[in-house]
């Protein structure tokens, strides 16, 4: 059974649901799933209730908008892209929209009958989206007019990436396809074998000078040549070991974070690694991590593990600086860094600001009643988040 081959089949939906339950519970096996408390609820895996605290920061909502709908139930991690003072957002049902970063005013709206599941990505003067049927659409970033279309063999649920006159598209069969940014002509593709079972979802590749860095569903991190797709190195981040397929799930689903020449990647196996980008040489490894994106601050990286514990790791050596367990089993998103705080979202639509120095909760707001699955994005001091229901909100720290 391979959940990537036919993502809309009943079998896949069961696998996606199973993976979601695993992520929510923070466990790699089914032990304890059916231990009920007196009310008939699963006591062992019940999400932590939110508790009161004294805020140390004030968060204000700058604006809110709607991207569309249709993500719920598909296991997607749709998030906006931000470039040149604009926020670009897509939805399965709703097309693509451009908003002003400062005010939220709508600049343009591209309507489509396609189910836009991957993206958007922005770069090279383009806004790029992919569909559940493998369509790739490039729009003019200034006007929203269509520039070119292409096709890949499987659904696209990761944001395309553009840079160095190249567009990179990750499809859900493990393939990376490179297109010419101007013409849409295919340049090369690279295939990677998939495990039998993986967490539903994947994230965008990352561009470096002449490099493409890809986190894979088998727990590895790969560097490719941007020129021809040739594999340059491959490094194991999360070792896929165990007796069952569930035990062996080791996905590196969050986009690796490139900080200078160092890559930070985290795995469902609760392992986080720092890797030298040009050589692939491991710099350090730590047994705390998860599938979401890594938040990078000046001296530390922030990761949320599958059980909902947030960790701060020393950027230079990987040692644990603090942990925050108050959000356990709340199915946290990847982390972002805003000012002196790390920010994560949860399954009830809450955003949580954690102090970078000690992990204490500093602020909390609710972006909506739908889950926050994708990591928030921070640009020019403004945090942008998109819920699974398609609502977009912008926040400033006071």
Image (tube, helix red, strand yellow):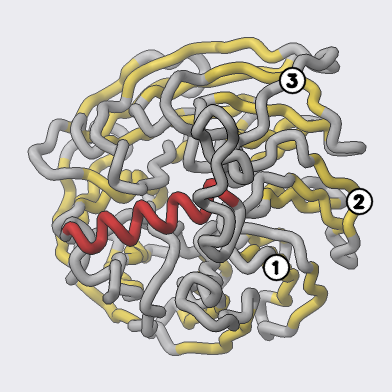
10 Å neighbourhood of mark 3: few (<14), some, or many (≥20)? few
10 Å neighbourhood of mark 1: few (<14), some, or many (≥20)? many
Mark 1–mark 2 Cα distance, whole angstroms, equals 16 Å
Q: Position of residue 259 (x, y in %)?
A: 71, 59
Q: Give the quadrant of residue 227.
A: bottom left
**In front of the other: 209 or 371:** 371
List the residue tagged with mark 1.
271
10 Å neighbourhood of mark 2: few (<14), some, or many (≥20)? some
Mark 1 lies on a secondary structure that is strand
List the residue tagged with mark 3.
51
In the rendered image of this protein, does residue 87 appear above or below residue 196?
above
- Of the numbered discs in the image, which one, if any, rests on residue 321? 2
Q: Position of residue 139 (x, y in %)?
A: 23, 44
Name the residue at 82% across, 74% down. 284
**In front of the other: 141 or 28:** 28
Mark 2–mark 3 Cα distance, whole angstroms, equals 23 Å
Question: Is residue 198 something that shows in the picture?
Answer: yes
**In front of the other: 311 or 62:** 311
Could you tell me how many numbered marks the image carries?
3
């Amino acid at each position: 059974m391979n959940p990537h081959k036919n993502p809309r089949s009943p079998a896949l939906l069961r696998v996606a649901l199973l993976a979601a339950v695993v992520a929510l519970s923070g466990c790699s096996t089914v032990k304890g799933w059916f231990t009920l408390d007196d009310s008939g609820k699963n006591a062992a895996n019940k999400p932590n209730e939110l508790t009161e605290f004294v805020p140390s920061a004030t968060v204000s909502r700058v604006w809110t908008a709607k991207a569309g709908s249709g993500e719920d139930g598909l296991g997607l991690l749709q998030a906006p892209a931000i470039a040149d003072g604009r926020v670009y957002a897509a939805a399965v049902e709703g097309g693509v929209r451009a908003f002003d970063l400062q005010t939220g005013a709508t600049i343009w709206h591209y309507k489509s009958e396609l189910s836009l599941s991957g993206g958007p990505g922005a770069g090279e003067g383009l806004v790029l989206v992919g569909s559940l049927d493998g369509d790739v659409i490039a729009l003019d970033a200034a006007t929203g007019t269509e520039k070119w279309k292409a096709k890949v063999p499987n659904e696209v649920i990761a944001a395309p990436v553009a840079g160095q006159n190249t567009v990179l598209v990750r499809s859900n069969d493990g393939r990376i396809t490179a297109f010419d940014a101007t013409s849409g002509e295919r340049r090369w593709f690279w295939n990677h074998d998939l495990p039998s079972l993986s967490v539903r979802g994947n994230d965008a590749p990352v561009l470096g000078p002449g490099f493409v860095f890809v986190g894979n569903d088998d727990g590895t991190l790969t560097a490719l040549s941007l020129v021809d797709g040739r594999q340059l190195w491959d490094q194991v981040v999360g070792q896929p070991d165990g007796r069952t397929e569930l035990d062996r799930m080791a996905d590196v689903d969050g986009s690796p974070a490139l900080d200078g020449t160092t890559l930070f990647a985290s795995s469902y196996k609760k392992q986080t690694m720092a890797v030298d980008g040009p050589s692939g040489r491991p710099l350090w490894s730590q047994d705390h991590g998860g599938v979401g994106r890594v938040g990078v601050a000046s001296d530390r990286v922030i990761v949320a593990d599958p059980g909902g514990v947030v960790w701060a790791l020393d950027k230079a050596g990987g040692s644990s600086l603090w942990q925050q367990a108050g959000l356990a089993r709340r199915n946290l998103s990847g982390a972002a860094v805003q000012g002196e705080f790390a920010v994560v979202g949860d399954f009830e639509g809450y955003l949580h600001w954690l102090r970078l120095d000690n992990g204490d909760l500093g602020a909390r707001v609710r972006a909506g009643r739908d889950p926050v699955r994708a990591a928030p994005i921070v640009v020019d001091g403004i945090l942008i988040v998109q819920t699974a229901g398609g609502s977009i909100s912008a926040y400033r720290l006071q």
